Image: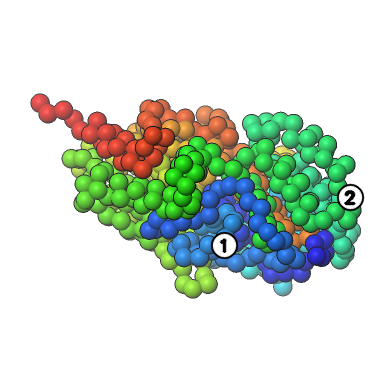
Amino acid sequence: MALMDSPRCSATTPRQKAPASARATHPNFRATPPMMSPISGQALPTAREVYSPPLAAPRPTHDVVSSGGGSWRKGVLLVLAGLLTACATPHGTSKASTRDEDGVWRSRGYGWLLSVTPEGMRLHQETAAGCYADPSSTAELKEMFGLQEPGPSADVRDFFGAPGETRYRFDRLSALPAGCDTPRTWNALELFDVFRATFAEHYAAFPQRAPDWLARLDAQRSRVTPDMDGRALFTLFADALRSLNDAHVGLMADTLTYEPRPTGTFELLEQASRAMQRPVRDVQREWMRAYRDGILQTVLRGEGHHVGNQRVLWGFAAPRVGYLNLLTMGGFVAGEEGQTPTLAQELAALEPVLDEALTAFAGADAVILDVSNNRGGHDAVARAVAERFTARPRRAYSKWATGAKDVPPQEFTLQPSPRPAFHGPVYVVTSDVTVSAGEVLTLALRALPNVTHVGTATRGAFSDMLMKPLPNGWTVHLSNEHYADARGQDHEARGLPPQRPLEIFKSEDLWHSHAQALRALADSLVPPRP
């Protein structure tokens, strides 16, 4: 097996905020592996440790997974992929193909070398252990870096994909560093060093998850020989990643995949499948169907709406108590065959759904916003939802990348939506399943004085996923960003704790406890009769 040659393959994307065998090109899109499709209870890949034989020669795994739920790559993380189309250019912002932007640029953090010419863009991955070409296409790179603005000096620029989205600061170089474009063969020891350097330079959560992780990885280097078998090297990497148990960390090599082990509710579902001696996917299917049916029948009493490509459920849970459930932060529109919906298309599909629901809630005493089973998606969608519940601008959260020297945190502020909105009491409901962009929505809502956080703590995986193709064609993804709430608190690994605890998924009744908990919450919000 030729596992160590640098591949010349079709494009992969360096950034993703969501789950992933397909490469989500938008930097602020992420999700984590769902147990079940929110569409109709169809089983999806479980978050688990996977060693899938046999390991074939490497090939690019750049298939785009439909966020409509129809196509999933077996044994890898779910990607609710979102490609960003061309956006209107605001004053002072220009397309990244003008002469001022031509040249070679090194990112602060992220480990990127971006080459810009009038003909297009190229990307290289750079670590202390080596530099190599990234197979991303110009079209994909423009989704992330297609807009730019001058930085604090002539040789500094900020590149980004859309106004208001994550900005990446770059410094101009005189030329591409030597060796970056030189074809070469990478042996197992060199791949180990690149893997190690990637985490040392970019992983954001060592203090919370595994403070001595690099030291323990270093102790394994003596086991690696230059001609080490690909499967053995993959297993060594996977064993190292296991202790992080981060929902945004994974490793893929064609049919061989590492994913974090299930915890919390997901672990309970696996235990249930073993106790019932039934396939875990069958159990997951029943659980997700029970979740959906419990909302429609018990919470909404048979009078709810299931819309937005079956990602949204809404109605009245009690007299004058509105209920809105978002299963994802994307996937609200089914893309055309072979196409992934853009962020603009996602928002265009979601906004009318929110309009209808919030118009109906206009006279409500309270609204329950349920994201207890939200698997993530676009941060931009999360902010758009949160803006329906604020009456004035509110600082929501900030973020910054590991290793981004002298780059101030990027601030995100919610602006009141001009569309139908609700500014009364809001109760946002979460669980340990709530993850990624679902957590970002919760983070933003907690900045609002009219919002109360109910349920159990969220998963604690906020960061975008930094997608790093390795020189041999494997792909590793990791959390490299820090998210802080309006008070400056970082909740990575521990999750967002509720202000009003309410057990959502009880171990003794996983199938019905969610509906029972939401029914009780809704009833508690009905004012007593005089």
Taking the spot 46% from the left edge, 41% from the top edge, the residue there is 275
Closest to the observer: 47 or 455?
Answer: 47
Task: Answer whether residue 449 is visible to the viewer in this image.
Answer: no
Task: From the viewer's perspective, tell me whether residue 483 is left or right of residue 529.
Answer: right
Residue 434: image location, x then y, percent = 46, 42
Residue 247: image location, x then y, percent = 58, 44
Dot 1: element: loop
Location of the C terminus by quadrant is top left
Residue 320: image location, x then y, percent = 20, 40
Separation of disc 1 and disc 2 at Cα? 32 Å
Question: So how many labels did they put on this image?
Answer: 2
Q: Residue under circle 1?
A: 73
Task: From the viewer's perspective, tell me whether residue 421 is left or right of residue 21.
Answer: left
Rendered image: mark on residue 225? 2
Taking the spot 37% from the left edge, 30% from the top edge, the residue there is 502
Q: Amino acid at mark 2?
A: Thr
Rendered image: mark on residue 366? none
60 in relation to 230, above or below: below
Closest to the observer: 445 or 415?
Answer: 445
